Image (cartoon, rainbow, N blue to C red):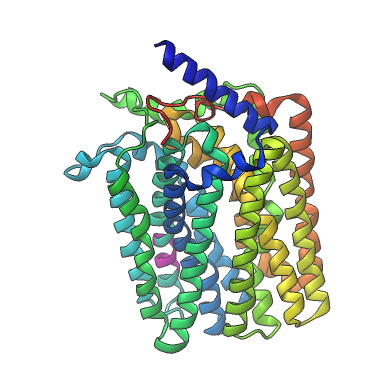
């Protein structure tokens, strides 16, 4: 008991260091080779690929088929399924699957959700947008639903697998995996589509669901998993749905925290979901997009993730998040400059490189903060709510207005607008820092070390 108390006190000290930033450069790099952060990498690979299937790849496929811009951007509404995942995340937390449930709550759901994603991607492979946009929309929504369910399990497994001191590095490794999964699936689909067609391209990409499934089967249940209260009737079921929300909103400043979650990514989401339209209108070929968008962007993102992990350890959570928000705001401006400049390989490389570098830093710092907000009894439900809220406004605006705004104002003014939309989130986070709400908002995921030592 004394040993456990000492370990808990040590873990809380580690989290205090993570928030305020007290680690040496050597200590900041060491966790990258530990088991749990490495597992987070493979989880991220599988998390990233469904997004690419209904994001950049579907946008390119529709644009090349001659679909109207408004219809193309409307397809981003399929991403809104990700923003509704909190509605069924409680099922992942508490419902035991028959037969494969013996593998454990998280592992069984990893396997089940992975199979759903592979089936949904295969279904999208065989629809023809030129024949029926409606069927294509349904297929994209099914991929979104399966991918969102996969994300619910992956995020919960990652948070519970990582020790509090590993949240920053683990978030970075997860972002490494997410980027590699999305970029690899995106590049593979582009290359194969140009040679054997979109159908086989999508089918080949379905194998990216396997890394997360195999990680769960090899490592088993996470050490910090906490089973919620048993459900015996409708009252308990209702409590399991409302419980995660009630626990979160009982914290000091919870409404401001939620407002920040809603606002901080509006400009970034609007910009990111329209890049492929910009590149297509500027006359870039698939190979040029693969080289400059996918290739340079990939390496810039990886560098940004590594820098984000170092900043998180050295500067602490609060200052590193604030820096990342400012960089992501400025990155939107770079695309306004590119649109004004016109087609330029160097210009595209610079804009894509800076945007991905900034997003890589933000992917570590902001995701680590959001992970730290969770209570271990409701990991799946609370992180689903937080991550869904983080992009719902931007995705809704993209799906309903982005195409029309681009046609009415042009790309330059559109990206200037996305830059301005990023400012409120920066100011709100700065005010939360000054009021002490960042420290007050974290949950047990940031303080509870689990029953066993870190791997």
In depth, the one of 42 and 96 nearer the eye is: 42
Taking the spot 62% from the left edge, 83% from the top edge, the residue there is 288
Relative vertical location of residue 196 with respect to residue 396 in this rendering, above or below: below
- For the magenta stretch, what is the residue range? 137-142
Q: Can residue 29 be seen in this view?
A: yes
Taking the spot 82% from the left edge, 78% from the top edge, the residue there is 341
Taking the spot 36% from the left edge, 32% from the top edge, the residue there is 223
In depth, the one of 225 and 343 nearer the eye is: 225
Pinpoint residue 373: horizontal percent, then vertical percent: 56, 32
Q: Which residue lies furthest to the bottom in this view?
A: 195
Q: Residue furthest front?
A: 26
Which SS type dominates the magenta stretch? Answer: helix
**How many numbered circles are shown?**
0
Left or right of residue 171: residue 20: right
Q: Name the image quarter holding the C terminus.
A: top left
Pinpoint residue 423: horizontal percent, then vertical percent: 79, 48
Left or right of residue 47: residue 106: left
Pinpoint residue 164: horizontal percent, then vertical percent: 52, 32
Relative vertical location of residue 115 with respect to residue 413 in this rendering, above or below: above
Q: Name the image quarter holding the N terminus.
A: top left
Taking the spot 61% from the left edge, 66% from the top edge, the residue there is 299
Is residue 14 covered in magenta? no
Relative vertical location of residue 180 with respect to residue 236 in this rendering, above or below: below
Left or right of residue 13: residue 409: right
In depth, the one of 317 and 58 nearer the eye is: 317
Would you identify the image quadrant in which residue 100 lies? top left
Q: Residue furthest top?
A: 2
Pinpoint residue 289: horizontal percent, then vertical percent: 61, 79
């Amino acid at each position: 008991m004394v040993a456990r108390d000492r370990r808990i006190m040590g873990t809380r000290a580690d989290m205090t260091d993570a928030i305020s930033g007290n680690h040496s450069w050597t200590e900041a790099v060491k966790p990258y080779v530990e088991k749990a952060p490495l597992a987070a990498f493979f989880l991220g690979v599988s998390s990233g690929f469904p997004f690419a299937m209904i994001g950049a790849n579907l946008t390119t496929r529709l644009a090349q088929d001659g679909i109207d811009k408004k219809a193309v951007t409307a397809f981003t509404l399929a991403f809104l399924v990700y923003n509704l995942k909190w509605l069924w995340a409680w099922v992942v937390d508490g419902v035991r699957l028959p037969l494969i449930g013996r593998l454990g709550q998280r592992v069984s759901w990893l396997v089940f959700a992975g199979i759903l994603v592979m089936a949904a991607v295969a279904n999208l492979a065989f629809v023809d947008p030129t024949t029926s946009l409606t069927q294509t929309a349904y297929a994209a929504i099914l991929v979104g639903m399966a991918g969102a369910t996969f994300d619910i399990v992956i995020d919960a497994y990652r948070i519970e697998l990582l020790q509090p001191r590993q949240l920053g590095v683990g978030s970075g490794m997860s972002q490494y995996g997410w980027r590699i999964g999305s970029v690899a699936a995106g590049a593979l689909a582009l290359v194969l589509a140009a040679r054997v067609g979109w159908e086989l391209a999508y089918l080949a990409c379905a194998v990216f669901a396997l890394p997360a499934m195999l990680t769960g089967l090899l490592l088993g249940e996470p050490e910090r998993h906490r089973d919620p209260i048993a459900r015996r009737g409708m009252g308990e079921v209702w409590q399991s749905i409302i419980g995660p929300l009630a626990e979160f909103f009982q914290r000091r400043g919870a409404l401001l925290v939620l407002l920040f979650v809603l606002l901080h990514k509006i400009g970034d989401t609007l910009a990111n979901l329209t890049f492929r339209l910009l590149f297509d209108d500027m006359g870039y070929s698939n190979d040029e997009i693969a080289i400059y968008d996918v290739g340079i962007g990939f390496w810039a993102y990886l560098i940004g993730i590594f820098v984000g992990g170092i900043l998180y350890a050295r500067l602490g959570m609060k200052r590193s998040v604030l820096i990342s928000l400012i960089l992501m705001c400025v990155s939107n401006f770079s695309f306004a400059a590119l649109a004004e400049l016109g087609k330029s390989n160097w210009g595209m490389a610079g804009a894509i490189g800076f945007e991905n570098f900034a997003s890589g830093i933000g992917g570590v710092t902001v995701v680590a903060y959001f992970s730290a907000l969770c209570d271990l009894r409701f990991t799946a439900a609370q992180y689903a709510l937080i991550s869904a809220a983080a992009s719902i406004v931007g995705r809704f605006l993209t799906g309903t207005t982005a195409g029309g705004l681009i046609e009415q104002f042009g790309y330059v003014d559109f990206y200037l607008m996305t830059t301005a939309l990023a400012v409120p989130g920066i100011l709100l986070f700065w005010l939360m820092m000054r009021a002490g709400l960042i420290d007050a908002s974290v949950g047990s995921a940031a303080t509870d070390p689990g029953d066993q030592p870190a791997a």
